[in-house]
Image: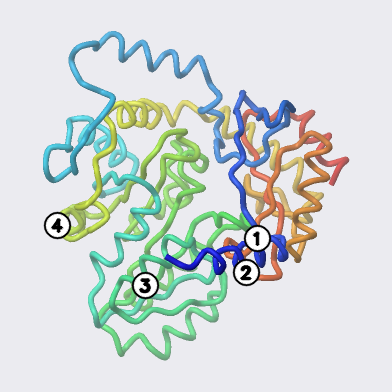
Amino acid sequence: MRHMNEIDKILDRLAAEDNLRTLRTIAADGRFVEHDGRRYVNLSSNDYLGIAADVTLQHEFFETLREGAGERFVMGNPSSRLITGNSMDYSELETALAALYFGKTALVLGSGYLANAGVLPAIVAKNDLVLADKLVHASILDGLRLCGCEWRRFAHNDMEHLEGILRRERGRYGRVWVVTESIFSMDGDRAPLVELVALRRRYDLNLYLDEAHAFGVCGNNGAGCAAAQGLDNEIDVIVGTFGKAVASYGAFVAVAPVVRELLVNRMRTLIFATALPPVVLQWTRFVVERLALFDDRRAHLQRLTAMIAPAAGECAEDMTQIVPIMAGSNSAACEIAEKMRKEGFWVTPIRHPTVPRGKARVRLSLTATLMEDDIEKLLKIL
């Protein structure tokens, strides 16, 4: 361990750069959060459909547990899936997930981080090349560092840059993987999936798509951006998480059956991880099976997004539920966040290493729990 004086110096430097994080105790209450005795409208939640705030839906789920009382021990699952942790709840959830995607099977993991850190190291070979969008999530980058193959990053959503690399390099490698997100977590923009699929066909690529911020939100059944555009059969690996719109915990990958079998045998973040508690799996399945019923929530979220589009300088069709307010410096981001909290909106500054240095921001996350009055007040402040 570092000498305590070194640690103090690191913390002092972070504080001087307005980059020191602290853990705040926060209580959620519907569309609000409470902190230090004050109540705020929550603009920092990934509860995009408002399911975490839906007490009625949760009571309905608890009733299903009560009806099956005594049949399953639901609170803990103290083993890995490959030992004794692979309860029936896993297969039931994976069946519900597979029904959302053309020709794919699902594999449930402990978290989105474990999924992104584990899939590529399990399936790429040493003579493969992985090309990742410059802004993919840190969990994907950590997975790339474990791959043992060559990997590079292309300019964000820049298909010309990506194709230039492919044109020069495709013939030198066995397989080429292109990795991106459907909705980017810090910028809120979308990947050009139609163009990526065209490149997949032209250069015989494999596509890896992280749908963390689109799963539950996009498409009539909430399956994400690729399914909404009818392109899910063109994506080789789809990753989705349960800790956002589904208001649960864990993640999944949707892949071809043979790839799922390979992951079960080689994916270290599955093999060496404790299984999820059955009650979590049951709640997740309860929500996933009802995703198609939440069209009204998705429509309401789209209306709220359209309201804020002019202030963001975007067309409503291009907007997502993630709206960044660019600040540049850490101090400016902290100042904006503090001013908005004084106005009754809970937001947090987003700083390096979450975003590049000099691109600090405040990120607004819109959810279906918000009301139009909330957005009107927000627009006046902005």
Mark 3 or 4: in front is 3
**Disc with the residue nearer the chain's start (3 vs 2):** 3
**As shown in the figure, which amino acid type bears the numbered disc 1?**
Arg
| Residue wearing tag 4 | 265
Give SS at disc 4: helix
Q: Amino acid at mark 2?
A: Pro
**Residue 331 at x, y percent in the picture:** 78, 60
Quarter of the image where one finds residue 45: top right
Q: Earlier in the sequence, mark 4 or mark 1?
A: 4
Q: CA distance from mark 3 to mark 4?
A: 20 Å
Which residue is outermost to the right?
380
In the image, residue 81 sits, relative to residue 6, either above or below, namely above
Percent of width and height locating residue 314? 74, 55
Q: Amino acid at mark 4?
A: Asn
Q: Earlier in the sequence, mark 2 or mark 1?
A: 1
- Reading the image, the residue beneath label 3 is 145
In this rendered view, identify the residue nearer to me: 20 or 244: 20
Q: In this picture, is 12 found above or below 125?
A: above
Q: Is residue 240 above or below residue 170?
A: above
N-terminal of the pair, mark 3 or mark 4, is 3
Residue pointed to by mark 2: 356
Tell which tag, 4 or 2, sits nearer the viewer: 2
The answer to whether mark 3 and mark 4 are in CB contact below 8 A is no
The Cα atoms of the two marked residues, 2 and 1, are separated by 8 Å
User: Where is residue 344 drawn, in percent x and y?
Assistant: 79, 33
Q: CA distance from mark 4 to mark 1?
A: 38 Å
